[in-house]
Amino acid sequence: MRLCLAILALLTAALAHAGPRLAGPRLIGYFPFWASYSHGASLADAPAERLTDLIYAYARLGADGSVSPGDFFADQVKIHQGDALYRGNYALVPLLHKRNPALNVLISVGGWNWSTHLSAVAADPAKRRRFVATALALFDRYGFDGIEIDWRFPVVGGHPDSGRRADDAVNLQRLTRELRDGCARRPRCVIALTVSPLAGQRTGWVFPAMLADVDFVSLIATDFHGSWSPRTGHKSPLYAPAGEPSIAAAVAALKAGGVPAGKLVLALPAQGVAWQGVAPAGLGQPHRGVPLGTWDNEQTGPTGTFTGREIGRLIASGEFERRWDDVAKAETLYRAGDGLLLSFESPRALAAKLAFADREGLAGISLWELGSDAQDGLLAQAYAHHHPWAARWQALCRAAGTALPWLAGVTFGGLLGALLLAWRLHRRRHREQARHGEIARVINALPAQLDATIAAVDAGKRRLAARPIDVTALDLAALDTLAERSDALRTQLLPLTQRAAPLRELERFSGAIAGERSLECMLDAMVRFLGDDPRIADAEIRDDESAGADVLCVDADRCGARFSHDTLADYSLVLRFRSPLSLDDEAYFRSLASQVVLIRRQLHELARQPQLLAELHEVASRRERLHYIRAERGYSGIHAGGLAAPVYITLRLRAIRLYFDELVQVHRSYLVRPQAVSGCRRTGGGVELIVAGHGIPVARGQLSRLKARFPHWFVAESACSS
């Protein structure tokens, strides 16, 4: 027993002092915002303890250089439940730091679809300043530790909508220089770039000057072949025949060009790509397109992308032949029945790349993306490669965390059972002894008590004889009737006092949701309200449920219920009760649900008003081109790009803000779109914002709030300070 206690104490002390701080090569994981849609993933799911850096993709880069959240719902609205309710993935960044204080969480800007404005922003000094100011503001507000600029691609371009200039590479260097200057007083500020493995997409890059202000640069080694390729090939080959692209060839070219090996990271895929209709030869063959991947459906169309978890299931099915390419150090799967060829990053292929990175002295590896990696998959393998003892220790801790509580529980249960049995035996003996003693005392005292009782009875008879009491049958009947009526009155009044409390709670709930205008806010208010109810064990909002036939469906065991309705879109509220629900309690919770449905129906009826919808459409259709809205003599004038004259609607500014909360009221007569503000200037009457060349007055009472929320508006013109 002493040995077990000593082991438990030793493990507890080791767990308490074992920190997550990692030394050595970087282990980087990407988390794209759309993982919260396609995977249903949360940023809290990221294995922070195994990472040195986590990169969240992507932020939005405006044409004016401003950096802002990339997806409003995933980043700032979607509810994640842990020890509390968290709104959006951004709210989970502090939790990652708590789990691993040494972790760097970066925000990424760019990517294939979002590099549109990078060329214009990097070329304009004012836009570069706005880029730096808004990026640092994003760090401060949400807890990010740095930024990755994933520009696809300077000079040569990538996506057809992306801008390009001959001096893009020079301007990128200026942008990183200004970022580094802006980070000068920060204890931690990581700056990263990405670089293509193809020399034709690195035109104008001058090394090592390009990386003077950069902590690391990721070589995009994730997509040498994909769904766009006319012929099949390895997704991420380490080697290739001379003249063909590969990781080793790209690393050699970059190092020869002046890239420090200690700043170069290999970005590797946690996903695989598949083609169908491939001849048995497999590689280098034409194909008939790609199949539906892990997250694909008829609406999205096929991408051929498979996650590591899905690939593991395909291998386990026994339908595929595994093929190892010893030249490329890469692996594929082939299914002869339909000619499906799948290229993926296998443990054997990753081991070859990790050994290569060690030999070349590279900065580390990154994985695109964490949600596609299998449990104990590629990241776990890379972590064990760089930190073998730490990985073994973590495995031991996980095993201890599973086994020790069970063993301790069994031991404690046995001891508790033995103690309980001994206590019950002792208590039984004590009771028997007490009972025997009581019987003896009663027997000994019985003669004297009998004598005293006989004497008392005789005395009572004498007193009754002296003072006779006349109690008639009528008096006794009246007393019995009064007693019965008192009991009946008590039975009627008690339920009334008990039923008044739920009515007061319903009134309080009505007040809680009356001011909420969005469905999400109503459900949040309902969850908070139910959190105070002692009958509720748990309340969870789900967004993948279809509406049932009844607004409140109670489980068969009456320990749970689901609140859903057509007016709640795809949301539902799942309740768990601490004890089976009574009929009165069911009526109470059904009333709560009905109040939400009633308010939602009223909002729907309001939305059916044709004039209101038409006027809201006038604003919404110009959302991206909107400059400002001005209140004028009972109307509101919409000023937007492409309009020769304002468009007037009858909605007041206050009503417009109810539906478009991204608009900012800077004056009682003006709403502005923040992205349309290019700066400010001082006038004789105060401060004006510059919006599409127009001066918009700022109310004096709004100035301090606007400076705190939008500091970049006031950066360029020091005259605007007050």
Image (cartoon, grey):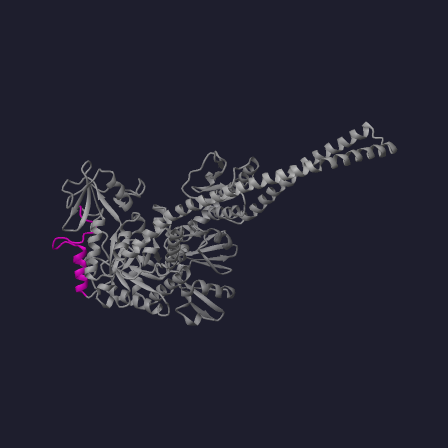
Q: Is residue 629 left or right of residue 285?
A: right
Q: Residue at x 17, y 61 (%)?
A: 253
Res 716 → quadrant: bottom left
Main SS of the magenta part reads loop
Please, which residue is most extreme toward the top here?
A: 473
Residue 570 horizontal/vertical position (percent): 42, 41
Residue 13 horizontal/vertical position (percent): 39, 58
Residue 576 or residue 180, whichever sits in front: 576
- Work out whether residue 44 can be spotted: yes
Q: Does 39 appear in magenta?
A: no
Q: Is residue 456 left or right of residue 660?
A: right
Please, which residue is most extreme toward the right here?
A: 466
Residue 627 horizontal/vertical position (percent): 41, 58
Q: Is residue 107 above or below residue 450?
A: below
Q: Is residue 580 above or below residue 91?
A: above
Q: Residue at x 36, y 54 (%)?
A: 70
Q: Is residue 456 left or right of residue 363?
A: right
Residue 128 or residue 595, whichever sits in front: 595
Res 185 → quadrant: bottom left
Residue 668 or residue 435, whichever sits in front: 435
- Work out whether residue 33 can be spotted: no
Q: Residue at x 40, y 65 (%)?
A: 712
Residue 494 or residue 183, whichever sits in front: 494
Q: Does 245 appear in magenta?
A: yes
Residue 407 horizontal/vertical position (percent): 39, 46
Q: In this picture, which residue range is highlighted in magenta? A: 232-257
Report how many numbered discs are placed on residues in the image: 0
